[in-house]
Image: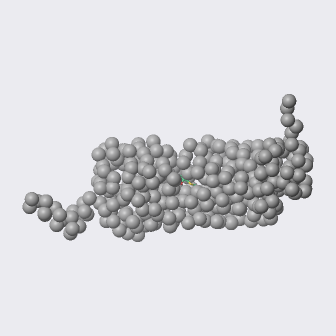
Amino acid sequence: MTRRQATLEDVAIEAGVSQQTVSRVLNNPAIVAERTRKKVLAAMNTLNYVPNRSAQILAGKALPTFGLITTSLALHAPSQIASSFKHHAELAGYQVAISMLKTGQLPSLQSALNEFRAQKINSVVMSLPLEKADAETLTRDNPDIRLLFLDVPPAAQVCHLGFLHSDGTASSVNLLLDLGHRKFGLLAGPESSISARLRLACWRDTLYQAGITEVDTEYGDWSANSGWIKTVELFSRHPDITAMLVASDQMALGVMSALRQINKRIPQDVSVIGYDDTPDSQYFHPALTTVRQDFDLIGKRAVDHLVGMKDRPHQAFNDLLPTTLVVRQSTAAPYASNAENPLIRQLQALVQQL
Ligand code: IPT
């Protein structure tokens, strides 16, 4: 015998609230107090309640669902962001519909937005790199949708939540300079990526300020594979590099593997600093020194913004979260300057006497 489908009334009785409250949780969870919302969601769970989405759409109601348009989730950082956004959206009573795009071209972005619009989804996070003009066009052409961008130039007149790259990049260059490094190799992300360009510009600025102007740069595509290939290329031109700045931990994984293959020890011969601090990075061998972007925080903040943007949908803002250097075992003084260290010189003299 099939069980009768639970109704909205059943949920209200189970949760001890009015039917109107249940309906609010379904259509506009942000206006319901967190405790009440949790009680109603728990009752829905217990009763296996299935909301009638098509009726909601037919009634012209916006769904308590956020859209997420993201770049490849095979990349570690965007998948961390998606996971955190989904987690915090659920806590706030929202589902997340995901659209994963191969390119950030305007026509494919617009059709992804149209698809969300057809499903009555009117709050969307854009977790992929977009140029200023493209982000502004999408905002202007979709006034009925709240758009929050995670990777656009800070000058764009749109709603922007991102990371402040300058803190982390400058402190990683300064750590290496303080350790005595002078021969740097840079592995940037793709030139099409806004954040990759910002990180590269900041590395270079900090190095130039320290008088280091001759620095070779390679561009990867964020994958570990590109990290491997570009490192081999870089070291075939400059075997004397002692410090590598890498624009993502995933590429740093490939960098470290390539360095081992060409018989460079990390950190004795070459120091490596990544960018992201995805949870796996502390288990790289050696544990990776890297720049931390708080992916849990950006997911939570994105939810807060989408809920808050209800009243002021298109007032442009820049909310930049800090980045911090996390020093682990992949960085040390360069081998040559070890020889200049008085303690090491004394030890070497001792060894020679033996
Ligand atoms: C950025 C990551 O730092 C980088 O490693 C790569 O995965 C890239 O995303 C993919 O677009 S994080 C982004 C919020 C700038």
Q: Is residue 263 left or right of 173 when viewed as pictured?
A: left
Question: What percent of the width, then of the height, locates residue 258?
Answer: 37, 44
Is 235 rendered above or below residue 168? above
Where, quadrant-wise, is the N terminus in this rendering?
top right
Question: Is residue 136 visible in this depiction of the protein?
Answer: no
Is 36 rendered above or below residue 56? below
Where, quadrant-wise, is the C terminus in this rendering?
bottom left
Is 353 rendered above or below residue 265? below
Question: Is residue 306 visible in this depiction of the protein?
Answer: yes
Q: Residue at x 41, y 69 (%)?
A: 209
Q: Is residue 153 left or right of 292 when viewed as pictured?
A: right
Q: Residue at x 46, y 52 (%)?
A: 281
Looking at the picture, tell me which residue is in the foreground, 44 or 171.
44
Question: What percent of the width, then of the height, locates residue 145?
Answer: 78, 54
Q: Residue at x 46, y 48 (%)?
A: 251
Q: Residue furthest left?
A: 353
Residue 194 quadrant: bottom right
Question: What percent of the width, then of the height, locates residue 285?
Answer: 39, 50
